[in-house]
Amino acid sequence: MRIAAVVAASLLGLIAVFQLALALGMPARRMAWGGQEEGKLPVGLRVASAVAGVVIYPLATLLILEAGGVTDFEVVPNVGPVGMWVFTGL
């Protein structure tokens, strides 16, 4: 379970870095947000990418590491298999 948690956390870290790069103006080139934008994202989507890269993905990473038994941060108390299935459904 720990190996899976570390792999998932690493992949989420890569996605967070990608979102931060988008927020800082990296050209999207149809790789993000539905592929509708050419070049840099508009301001609203850049803000959304910043929030995703700074808040959402790091919290998800902590949740996964906690459920996998890698850390003890207690982001959400008593996260276990049921909590991870709920998270997966989201």
Image: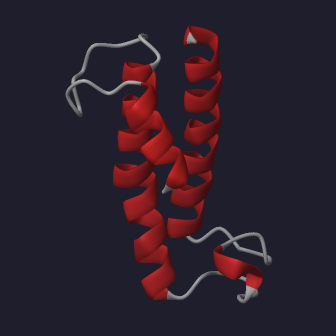
Q: Is residue 30 visible?
A: yes
* Quadrant position of the N terminus in the picture: top right
Q: Position of residue 84 (x, y in %)?
A: 46, 35
Q: Is residue 24 visible?
A: no
**Seen from this angle, which residue lies furthest front?**
82
Q: How is the image coloured?
A: secondary structure
| Image-based side of 86 in relation to 34, left or right | left
Q: How many marks?
A: 0
> Residue at horizontal 37%, vertical 63%?
51
> Residue at horizontal 51%, vertical 57%?
20
Q: In the figure, residue 78 lies in which quadrant? A: top left
Q: Position of residue 90 (x, y in %)?
A: 48, 57
Pick the front one: 75 or 86: 86
Q: Is residue 4 above or below residue 27?
A: above
Q: Is residue 17 above or below residue 47?
A: above
| Image-based side of 32 in relation to 81, left or right | right
Q: Is residue 41 above or below residue 74?
A: below
Q: Position of residue 38 (x, y in %)?
A: 76, 87
> Residue at horizontal 34%, vertical 52%?
55
Pick the front one: 60 or 30: 60
Pick the front one: 71 or 22: 71
> Residue at horizontal 63%, vertical 41%?
14
| Image-based side of 6 in relation to 87, left or right | right
